[in-house]
Amino acid sequence: MKTILITGAGGFIGSHLAERLKGEGNYVIGVDIKLPEYKTEVTNEFHQIDLRTDEGLEKLYTKLKHISIDEVYHLAADMGGMGYVTGRDAQMFQNSGRITLNVIQFAERKAVKGFLFTSSACRYPEDIQMEGSVKLSEDLAFPANPQDGYGWEKIMGELLCKYYKENFGLNTKVSVFHNIYGEKGIYDGGKEKAPAALCRKVAKAKNGDEIEVWGDGTQLRSFCHVDDAVEGLIRLMGTDVEGAVNIGSDEEITIKDFTQMIIDISGKDLKIKYVDGAIGVSSRNSNNTKAEKVLGFKPKVELRDGMERTYKWIDEQVNGSKFKAILVEGAEVEDENTTYHIIEQQLDHAKEREMKNRGFWLAERRDGKSIYLHHSKFKKPEDILKNNN
Ligand code: NAD
């Protein structure tokens, strides 16, 4: 059993990583400015700290004063999809830069055995990703011309890893993520990335609707499921590798085909409207030669399977997951229908939380209206929920 610190454990990849490492019997300490939104109890302890500040760093030292840490996975960053990144260069460089400067210093002082920094495909020079089909191998990052403030901060983090290794002997590793997607990540509010944003748009649309997609659909990308990303990180932490290693899928797809795949998964009849938007580079794909050689890493989750899981989860968040339940014979309710759809209650809403605590379920009548029904009116409610899940 190792003691592992994960920064950004309240975020998408960090919470998946924490869940896996804790599940394997490690003692996992999470730190983030926010709590995990879609997962609970993924860590053994969790500290809500702003890692940008001196006070935050002090707090971290104090909280973990008597704990010896084996490994640090550093994922905390100010980040989002292209819509968020665009025009926020100064802010993102400042925020993520300060976090990384603090966290790597903390790791060195705590004499951890392994420190892993999560870089991004935005580290690669923009000019080599503007036409054709490009597979990015790690050595192409220098001379550097990365994508905006976010990319420069990642280059800074990578250089810090190199210098801390050379100057202090800190055992640093660098992963380079390429479009990680999956369930239980941000899907609205502006910070979401393309796969989640497209799933949300499709989930909200009705048959015959048009959904808007940024660009002309010809952009090439590869997408890697979060389960594979987590596997890649754990393998990288356990291996001594010089320099950065790509963690991504090397199967490229156009945004047009990717969007159509999501529409097909939804089973809806939708049209795509291409509009202006922050599209980033025109072609980006991972070259996995090094990852395969040094880590034996090959993504396992097929894009279609991973997107089915992701779409299902986002559809449930957007539209509520529906469970069929049969009323107990003779139950008195306000109409005669005996079959109801139970809608999974969103427990972040105070009213729904209160009703659930009092034993009421939110149910949908045949006419589409929602009503609260007490669980005693249903046959074996828990069984029904389990069977439908
Ligand atoms: P995320 O936004 O879900 O997670 C980042 C976490 O950092 C968030 O929970 C956020 O609250 C936390 N954070 C931000 N500011 C903080 C602060 N001041 N103090 C403490 N915590 C703070 O993003 P993610 O997709 O899980 O990405 C994790 C890491 O992987 C990031 O470093 C990101 O740059 C990198 N990355 C991700 C992708 C991807 O496709 N998701 C691609 C390339 C690189």
Image (cartoon, grey):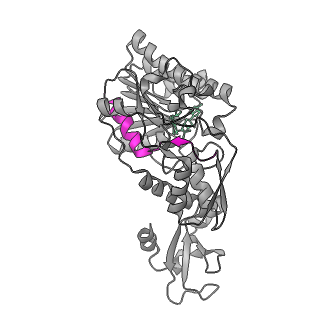
Residue 318, x across and y down, in percent: 60, 59
Residue 116, x across and y down, in percent: 42, 27
Q: Judge whether 360 appears above or below 274 on screen.
A: below
87 vs 366, nearest the viewer = 87
Q: Is residue 218 magenta?
A: yes
Q: Quadrant of residue 73?
A: top left
| Magenta stretch in the rendered image | 216-239
148 vs 184, nearest the viewer = 148
Residue at the farthest front position: 132
Q: Where does ligand 1 appear, by image quarter?
A: top right
| Residue drawn at 52 percent across, 51 percent down | 258
Instruction: Specify the quadrant that holds the C terminus.
Output: bottom left
- Is 191 on the left-hand or right-hand side of 117? right
- Is 146 on the left-hand or right-hand side of 138? right
* Count of numbered circles on the image: 0
| Residue drawn at 52 percent across, 26 percent down | 123
Instruction: Specify the quadrant that holds the N terminus.
Output: top left
Q: Judge whether 186 appears above or below 374 on screen.
A: above
| Residue drawn at 34 percent across, 38 percent down | 26
Q: Judge whether 291 appears above or below 228 on screen.
A: above
Residue 347, x across and y down, in percent: 58, 58
Q: Judge whether 316 appears above or below 148 on screen.
A: below
| Residue drawn at 39 percent across, 35 percent down | 233
* Residue 11 appears in view: no
Q: Is residue 156 magenta?
A: no
* Residue 205 appears in view: yes
